[in-house]
Amino acid sequence: MARVGEEQIKKNKSPAVLESILKSLEVMQSEDVEPTFNAVLTHLASRNILSNHRSLRVYLDTLVQSGMLKLRTEPTKQPNVRAKQVYSLTGRSPSIEVGEKALLFHGLNWSVPSMSSIRARTDLQGLARTRLARGTLYGSIEDTVSELLAKTKNTSRVHQTLVFCAALLATKKFDAQYLMRRAKERYVADIVESLLDEIDYLRFSPKPEVEDVRTLYEIRKQLTNRRQQWLNKSDRFRMSPNELIDVVGKQLGVK
């Protein structure tokens, strides 16, 4: 396995490295080796998996915040030496934040009256795409959109959730293939496809059915380039061009 560099850490983490860390702790515990930070680093480096202590810190912090690992600190006798950190497996699957708190973290430019927090189970693929900030492990845009659409059952909040998701999908970069895989797993693929259809219509239609053409042109200039065209349409959710103009314009700050 190739070593992981700091540049990759700034992007997505590697699911394979996450799995290797978990397996390393299993091996160390079975061999009665205390899984301290330095011991884990030595074990991974000896197998040419990970040798950078800053990178390992990111991975271990992610695993702890997800609930897969437990961290215990022990004071040292030397006053100027950092407390010993000992890790152990919890046996739980990873949990991440995918509520409206995550939407705001990813840049939702909206006033949210009652910011919701939703924790959802995920796998190592989803965990690798998380971002840790101020003690909260936020799911990716793709996981957040899929989970939030799937979990919003209160009919009074469905439209608001769709609006928030449309605002982010129209203005932020995302992995289209991964988004649709997650949407299919959560049975919201038709809703996501409809959202993307409406966004593409707004961007590419030669004769848009909107009155605010000036704002439309400004929005078109700022919309993120999209390479994928979605052919399957659904009637479960439709936004009129004027509604989408309002949503995207507000998110971009041009309306």
Image (cartoon, helix red, strand yellow):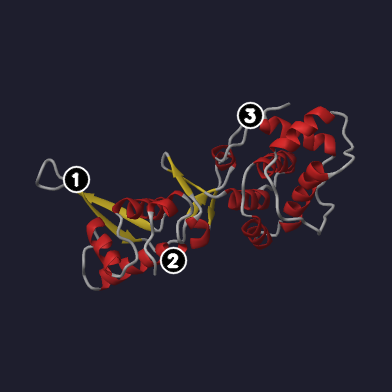
Q: Which amino acid type is marked by label 3?
A: Ser
**Outermost residue, top direction?**
255
The label shown at residue 82 is 1
In this rendering, the answer to whether 63 lies above or below 251 is below
Q: Which residue: 62% across, 54% down?
A: 175
Q: Position of residue 94 (x, y in %)?
A: 47, 58
Q: Which residue: 35% across, 64% down?
A: 21
Q: Residues within 10 Å of mark 2 (few under 14, many from 20)?
A: some
- Report whether 185 appears left or right of 232: left
Q: Position of residue 128 (x, y in %)?
A: 48, 57
Q: Position of residue 29 (x, y in %)?
A: 26, 68
Q: Which residue: 70% across, 60% down?
A: 187
Q: Which residue is mark 3?
A: 111
Q: Earlier in the sequence, mark 1 or mark 3?
A: 1
- Report whether 181 appears left or right of 83: right
- Element assignment for label 3: loop
Q: Which amino acid type is marked by label 1?
A: Arg
Mark 1 touching mark 2, by CB under 8 A? no
User: Quarter of the image holding residue 108?
Assistant: top right
Quadrant of the drawing holding the N terminus: bottom left
Front-lying residue, 194 or 88 = 194
Q: CA distance from mark 1 to mark 3?
A: 42 Å
Q: Which residue is mark 2?
A: 16
Quadrant of the drawing holding the C terminus: top right
Q: Residue 170, can we see it?
A: yes
Q: Which amino acid type is marked by label 2?
A: Ala
